[in-house]
Amino acid sequence: MKNLPMELLRTFVAVVELGGFTHAGELLGRSQPAISLQIKRLETLLAGPLFQRVAGQRLGLTETGEVLLEYARQILLLNDEVFSRLLKPKVSGCVRIGLPNEFAVSLLPEILGKFTQSHPHVTLDVKCDLSVNLLTRLEKNHEFDLVIAIRQSLGPEPVAKGWTEDLVWVVSPKHSVQTKTPLPLVVAPGGCTYRNRMIDMLNNAGKPWRIVYTSPNISGIQAAVLAGLGATVLARSTVPAGLQIVDTGDHCPPLGNVEIGLYHARGEVSDAVLRLVDYVAVSLNAHRMDSNVKPFLPPERRLVAL
């Protein structure tokens, strides 16, 4: 039986997340040649290349590399949890998290709850806002250590991608508001990615619309939709029980998808933040595999310091 050295796996994951050997070396305190040597040792153990150059100079993963990445993150997470729970000093501190409203009431509470059980010395301070505001508060005001944000596009450099979410139209099953003209909309305030997307798609399709209800929080939006005031747009994984997804067609145009990513603050990042990032990444990846949707964390970078 062969064993995968933990330090080689940690180096491999760092290269993937930071987008190159040089940045991984800076994080791990090793030279670029030393990082290259560790990757070569890992490739020798697995009898195949892990990286390939794609689209010019961008570093991508081979099929072997993609498979290893999934396992490496889980192995490192379990390894770190063992040390966190059994050895002192334990990982501790307060992590300030910014979340979009809809994710704060859907999947993430369960994930964050399990994290606090595994890391009882870490306190989570969670605040909710529109994604555009969360990123501003992270970058300019330094209010957060970690932000999960929804973006229509992460630009030509996909350094902060997390996962892709399909957007869907949602209505009350007791009210066929999608057949009305103009289409009544229940929305968040201006700046909301979902609001912008639904209006753009309706305009492109030439379908009349009007805003009938605006609420800054997801509970208010869901209550208004359930009462039959209008239709709204949500990420498919966040649609609550009691609301109905509308098939796209004559009444509601296709919405496409959005990118959702993890972002952390500039400068030195605490062990508690890094541990939480890994935990969220692995947990979301497992959820998306179970749900048959596009996998979490592509072969580029997971984190970006804003």
Image (cartoon, rainbow, N blue to C red):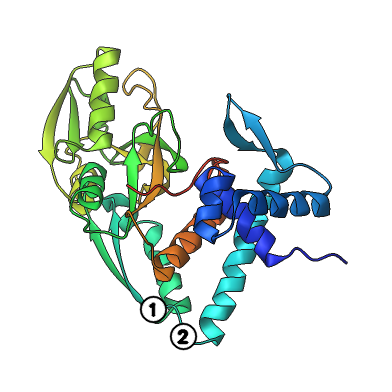
Using the image, determine if residue 181 lies above or below residue 118: above
Using the image, determine if residue 262 lies above or below residue 210: below
* Count of numbered labels shown in the rendering: 2
Tell me the residue at 20%/40% (across/down).
228
x then y, percent, for residue 102: 30, 50
Q: Answer with left or right where residue 223 lies relative to residue 234.
A: left
x then y, percent, for residue 201: 29, 21
Q: CA distance from mark 2 to mark 1?
A: 8 Å
Residue at mark 2: 89
SS label for mark 1:
loop
Residue 205 visible (yes or no): yes
Q: State the residue lying farthest toward the top.
A: 206
The reply to whether discs 2 and 1 touch (Cβ–Cβ < 8 Å) is yes
Other-residue count near label 2 (Cα within 10 Å), few / some / many at <14 / 14–19 / ≥20: few
Residue 287 visible (yes or no): no
SS label for mark 2:
loop
Residue at mark 1: 92
Front one among 135 and 175: 135
Which residue type does callout 1 highlight? Ser
Check residue 303 in the rendering and tell me which mark sits there, or answer none. Answer: none
| Screen quadrant of the N terminus | bottom right
Tell me the residue at 19%/20% (across/down).
181
Using the image, determine if residue 221 lies above or below residue 86: above
Front one among 277 and 129: 277
